[in-house]
Image (tube, grey):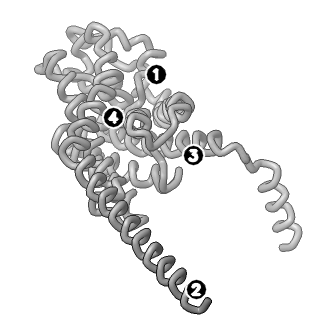
Amino acid sequence: MGKQKALMDKLVRTFQIRHMLLRQALAECLGTLILMMFGCGTVAQLVLSGGSHGVFLTVNFAFGFAATLGIMVSGQEANRTPTVTFALCLLGREPWRKFHVFFLFQTLGAFLGSGIIFGMYFGEGNLEMFFDDKCPNNNNSFSSCHNATAGIFATYPSKHLTLVNEFFDQMIGMAALIMCILAIVDPYNNPIHRGLETFTVGFVVLVIGLSMGFNPARDPYLLPWLAGVARAYSYWFFVPIFAPFIGVVVGMTVYQLMVGYHVEGEAREKREEEEKEEQEVMLKLSSLYNQGERLSA
């Protein structure tokens, strides 16, 4: 037992990383990997089983719980997606130097999580192709053919939606997510008890998935790109990559203008009043002390 403990202590000292930003980035990578592995795994079960192992509801529950587990694994202050990190940087709550590092590691985590699911099913005749060449109109085969599997790893539009519809879908979904997350982490607006934030964020992801069919942390098209199908829908993949960042700006602006600035302003005014009262009390005590010294003299 003693030798084992000594060995474990040696491993801790050997592999401990003291660079805080790198430690946080590795945690973000692992948290995003957990999210994508569980989320895409549920979608893969549903698609490849022909609907016998899951339904639309189970997919959204899986992504909601996966978001919670990803945050729990990576830490209480985890961002988990580049868009959330972008929002916090815009608000000045995170330094901009974090954005580039987190973006890289979060994207890597999403790719690895999706790759694990790809590897689990590859070779069984399921994921050897991302879409079926025999399907009519390959540009729409993702939504019209039961063999289509690209949608397991990335978001593709339904055949009845236009590019504009999908753009607003992605933008509004992310705006709603950011508004809710900002409310959850806002210390001035009904702060949630520590430890419950992770479950609340997962609940938000679940609600958005059920209402909009939007999963805000899908693999940013690395797997489909490698498979050569990113050009589908006239290079539609630009929409879910860039529209969420616009949604971040919209959601953050709406929340701050309608709630954030007001509650923060009230808290600042209250703090200033308390500081002013403390100064007045200190001045009165100092005046009484000086009067007492003069009388004693």
x, y percent for residue 22: 64, 39
Residue 222's mark? 1
* Three-letter code for the amino acid on which mark 1 is drawn: Leu
User: In the picture provided, is 228 more to the left or to the right than 102?
Assistant: left
Q: Amino acid at mark 4?
A: Leu
Q: Which residue is mark 4?
A: 48
- The answer to which of marks 2 and 1 sits earlier in the sequence is 1
- What's under tag 3, amino acid-wise? Ala
Q: Nearer the viewer, mark 2 or mark 3?
A: 2
Asked which quadrant contains residue 132, the reply is top left
- Asked whether residue 249 appears in the rendered view, the answer is yes
Q: Position of residue 222 (x, y in %)?
A: 46, 21
Going from the N terminus, do you reach mark 3 or mark 1 first? 3
The answer to which of marks 4 and 1 sits earlier in the sequence is 4
Discs 3/1, front: 3
Label 1: which secondary element: helix
Residue at 44% x, 16% y: name it: 225
What residue is at 35 percent from the left and 43 percent from the top? 42
The residue that mark 2 highlights is 293
Q: Which residue is mark 3?
A: 27
Q: Is residue 218 above or below residue 72?
A: above
Location of the C terminus by quadrant is bottom right
- Label 3 vs label 1: CA separation? 21 Å
Distance, label 4 to label 3, CA atoms, is 31 Å
Q: Is residue 1 above or below residue 149?
A: below
Q: CA distance from mark 2 to mark 1?
A: 77 Å
Q: Residue at x 52, y 54 (%)?
A: 75
**Contact, mark 2 vs mark 1 (Cβ under 8 Å):** no
Precedes in sequence: disc 4 or disc 3:
3
Q: Residue 12 is drawn in which quadrant?
A: bottom right
